[in-house]
Image: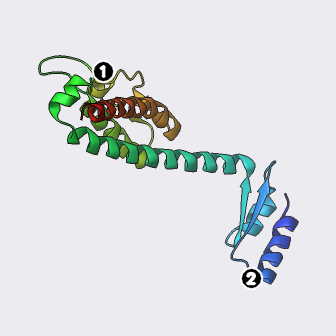
């Protein structure tokens, strides 16, 4: 797009009283267009940039949703008696190895704290990777973080649901 497109949109924006105008281009902008838009209420963007922003926004929403799910798991997990957690495979008995819902919760909370700050890449802690069978060592993006956490949280939710269902059946 050219400078003329920017000038036309600036005029339309001004005439209509709009707070901003946005020019969207598949092929980019000429240098004159960027200069004409500088320090005005006309913003220039490309479809690729818009796709990336939308994808990042969706991932941020998914991370927020995962955070809420982990918090709900935390509350439910610690409301269950220790014996029930052991009986239903949510934690190993003392001095035994096995699945640990508490470890999954701590692991997820740690990664979500890092991920929601938006500073990528970052390393996962070795202890949590080992305990939770996670193969990834470096988290490079929000998408990668969702891919790591989603199955972990889903498995914990399924185990908690199974425990609660079994508990209700015995009452």
Residue 110 x %, y %: 31, 40
Q: Quadrant of residue 155?
A: top left
Q: Which residue is mark 2?
A: 17
Q: Going 74% across and 52% down the picture, which residue do you hit?
A: 46
Residue 112 x %, y %: 38, 43
Give the position of the C terminus as an image quadrant. top left
Given the current orientation, which residue lies at the most extreme top position? 96
Give the position of the N terminus as an image quadrant. bottom right
Q: Going 35% across and 37% down the picture, which residue do you hit?
A: 108
Given the current orientation, which residue lies at the most extreme left position? 94
Q: Secondary structure at mark 2?
A: loop
Label 1 crowding class (10 Å Cα cut-off): few <14, some 14-19, many 20+? few
Residue 130: image tag: 1
Residue 93 x %, y %: 15, 21
The foreground one among 144 and 101 is 101
Q: Going 17% across and 35% down the picture, which residue do you hit?
A: 81
Looking at marks 2 and 1 on the same chain, the residue that comes earlier in the sequence is marked by 2
């Amino acid at each position: 797009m050219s400078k003329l497109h920017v000038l036309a949109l600036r005029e339309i924006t001004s005439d209509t009283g709009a707070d901003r105008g946005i020019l969207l281009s598949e092929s980019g902008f000429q240098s004159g267009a960027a200069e004409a838009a500088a320090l005005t209420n006309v913003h220039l963007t490309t479809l690729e940039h818009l796709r990336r922003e939308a994808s990042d926004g969706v991932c941020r929403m998914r991370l927020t949703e995962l955070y809420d799910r982990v918090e709900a798991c935390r509350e439910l997990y610690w409301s269950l008696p220790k014996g029930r957690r052991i009986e239903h495979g949510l934690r190993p008995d003392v001095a035994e190895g096995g699945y640990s819902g508490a470890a999954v919760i701590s692991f997820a909370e740690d990664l979500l704290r890092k991920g929601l700050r938006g500073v990528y890449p970052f390393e996962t802690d070795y202890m949590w990777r080992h305990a939770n069978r996670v193969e990834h060592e470096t988290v490079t993006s929000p998408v990668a973080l969702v891919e790591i956490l989603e199955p972990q949280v889903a498995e914990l939710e399924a185990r908690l649901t199974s425990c609660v269902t079994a508990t209700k059946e015995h009452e």
